[in-house]
Amino acid sequence: MSNFYTEISKYYDEIFPTGSAQISLIQELAGEAPKDILDVACGTGGYSLGLKEAGYNITAIDLDEGMIEGLKQKDPAIDVHVLNMLDIEQLNKKFDVIFCIGNSLVHLDNNEEIGKFFAICKKCLKPQGKILLQIVNYDRVLIKNIESLPLIKNDKVPLTFERYYEYLEHTHKINFKSILKVDGQELENQVYLHPIQYCDIYELLDNLGYTDIEFYGSFKKDRFDSLESLPLIVTAKVE
């Protein structure tokens, strides 16, 4: 898996371009710069770079060395680390906002691990600090038996990124297969995802004492519809 992500890191920005709505929501949560922000599973760091340019103090982590190397090449001064999201206490920092977007959260193994991540985030947030999470809306995936996600296509490169889902009921896992077609080659990958649902996310956050828990169907804060929304975005605050 690591080699696959290292390989696609060369094309990451063309597959997943940085969105202005995401930047705007993170800034809204953080308040006026400078504030301390942690980008969890940062990829090649488009959001970290955009927020740093806006005056925020950014720390970024990812498990893949290729992704981190790509970010270092863009900005050697940025504070980046190859680090598991369950180990962010090792940074010995407190943050105003911690965000984890791009469906990275569901690479954790189960609800228990996700709850552990939420608990660690709480320890690493300043008073009144906030988290922002974004995953695929797995309520919709499971209820409607969704077998693929929308094709990502970039005609400028050119490339296509195909994403297929197979729900494995006996293990409550999604078998996620992806195919990147670029430069005359096909790069395939398969990984298991944990399809956590919004009610479980709410319960985990609520039990840990998070407040102001909000769910959205887009980064523009459209209403979340468990049957129709493609993404699930959640924000919450610590006291």
Image (cartoon, grey):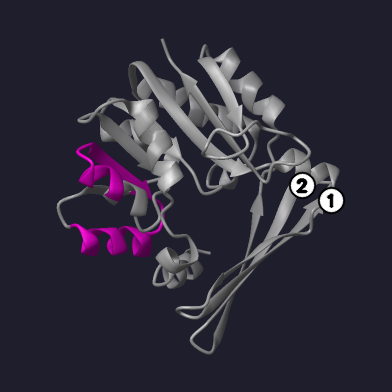
Q: CA distance from mark 1 to mark 2?
A: 5 Å
Q: Is residue 97 left or right of residue 22?
A: left
User: Which residue occupies the extreme bottom position in the image?
Assistant: 184
Q: Which sits in the foreground, 229 or 169?
A: 229
Q: Is residue 3 magenta?
A: no
Q: Position of residue 53 (x, y in %)?
A: 21, 46
Label 2: how many residues lie within 10 Å, few (<14), some (14-19) or many (20+)? many
The quadrant in which the C terminus is found is top left
Instruction: Classify residue 237 by image quadrant.
Output: top left
**Residue, x 72% and y 42% (percent of image)?**
138
**Which residue bears the numbered disc 1?**
145
Q: Which residues are magenta?
A: 50-75
**Which residue bears the numbered disc 2?**
141
Kindly check if marks 1 and 2 are in contact, taking CB atoms under 8 A apart as contact.
yes
Identify the secondary structure beneath mark 1: loop
**Residue, x 48% and y 60% (percent of image)?**
16
> Mark 2 belongs to which amino acid?
Val
Q: Is residue 58 magenta?
A: yes
